[in-house]
Amino acid sequence: MNINLAINEGSKILNSKFIPNPLLDAEILMAKIINKDRNYILLNYSNPINKNDLNKFFKLIEKRSLGKPVAYLIKKKSFWNSEFIISNDTLIPRPDTELVVENTLKLTKQRNKLNILDIGVGSGCILLSILKERKDFIGTGIDISEKCLNISKKNAINLKVSSRVKFYKSDVDKFNLGKYDLIVSNPPYINTCKIKYLERDVAEFEPKLALDGGLDGLSEIRKVIKKSSELIKKNSKFILEIGFDQKNKVINLLKKEGFYINSIQKDYANNDRCIVSTKI
Ligand code: GLN
């Protein structure tokens, strides 16, 4: 069998299970198995594939056909300017979350040596993307999940920012170290009862710890805002990702903790997704 036939066969299987981009997914999974990039596949589609690789490929196709996201199968995801290692314990970095990075970079063009805190750092995609672009900034990432911190640490090494970042395993409300010039966070903000109605790929495969925002979706956001208000320096920016229907409630929470609302950005689906505020 050659690469092309295997991909077509895999794609047919995914299509029959209603997976949205069957051919693309099959190509990406094949690239992973033969340890090449997608371009290689497109240029060498008539190359033969050995039995061992073929078996591995169809195992991945089977997992994908059951809904497991491609990013978890290949254990990586592109975000902003880098490729991040991920695992089943981390949320898959989303294009919408790039809003947090974009805002931070816009607001810090003329700033030097800022000390940044990321609450719920996960794979590290937000904090490490910022540190990679701002070479004299330093950062701290906290997370309740040790497994996520281990992934973050690997990503920090890959992005060559590990000397400028520290990680702590901590509950948000128990963390009391340092004062920060800027705080970013993408906390869990999905209402517990609504998780099961998210897309199957998300609901069945992404970590509940990174999604579950309690019975009103705001329990973690509340803690993050309170903690940020304590750890942020005066006149500093706080950039927070929120759920599509949380804008007004989050604005009220921020105001109560002494934040001025600068702007709210919409994501690619035109939902309110990111709030920029300043501690006054
Ligand atoms: N945006 C994610 C989703 O759509 C949720 C991320 C989060 O809870 N922080 O499922």
Image (spheres, helix red, strand yellow):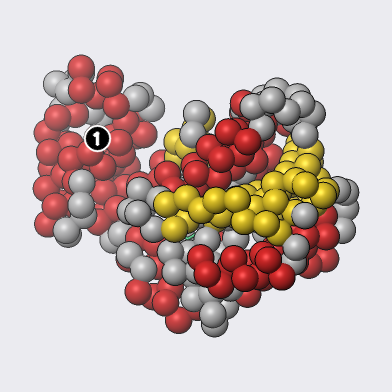
x and y, in percent, of residue 164 in the image: 77, 31
Name the amino acid type tagged 1: Glu
**Dividing the image into 4 quarters, which one contains the N terminus?**
top left
* Residue for point 83% across, 60% down: 230
Side of 195 relative to 126 (left or right): left
- Asked if residue 174 lies left or right of residue 110, the reply is right
Is residue 175 or residue 52 the one in the foreground? 175
At x 31%, y 39%, the residue is 29
* Residue extending furthest toward the top: 43
Say what secondary structure mark 1 lies in.
Answer: helix
Along the line of sight, which residue is nearer the eye, 193 or 123?
193
Instruction: Please state the horizontal and vertical placement of residue 83, each as a whole percent of the image.
Output: 49, 32
At x 74% / y 66%, what residue is drawn?
A: 257
The C terminus sits in image quarter: bottom right
Q: x and y percent of residue 207 in the render? A: 52, 63
Q: Quadrant of residue 16?
A: bottom left
Compare residues 61 and 182 and report the one nearer the observer: 182
Please indicate, yes or no, whether residue 87 appears anywhere in the rendered image.
Answer: no
Q: Give the answer, above or below, for where 275 lies relative to 58.
A: below
Q: Circle 1: is it few (<14), some (14-19), or many (20+) Cα within 10 Å?
A: many
Q: Residue at x 88, y 49 (%)?
A: 178
**Residue 245 appears anywhere in the view:** yes
Please give the residue where the numbered disc 1 appears in the rendered image: 27
Residue 100 versus residue 67 in the image, above or below: above
- State the image quarter where residue 3 is shown: top left
Whole-percent x and y of residue 204? Answer: 40, 67
Number of numbered discs present? 1
For this view, does 217 lie left or right of residue 78?
right
In-front residue for pair 234/67: 234
Q: Is mark 1 within 8 Å of ligand 1?
A: no
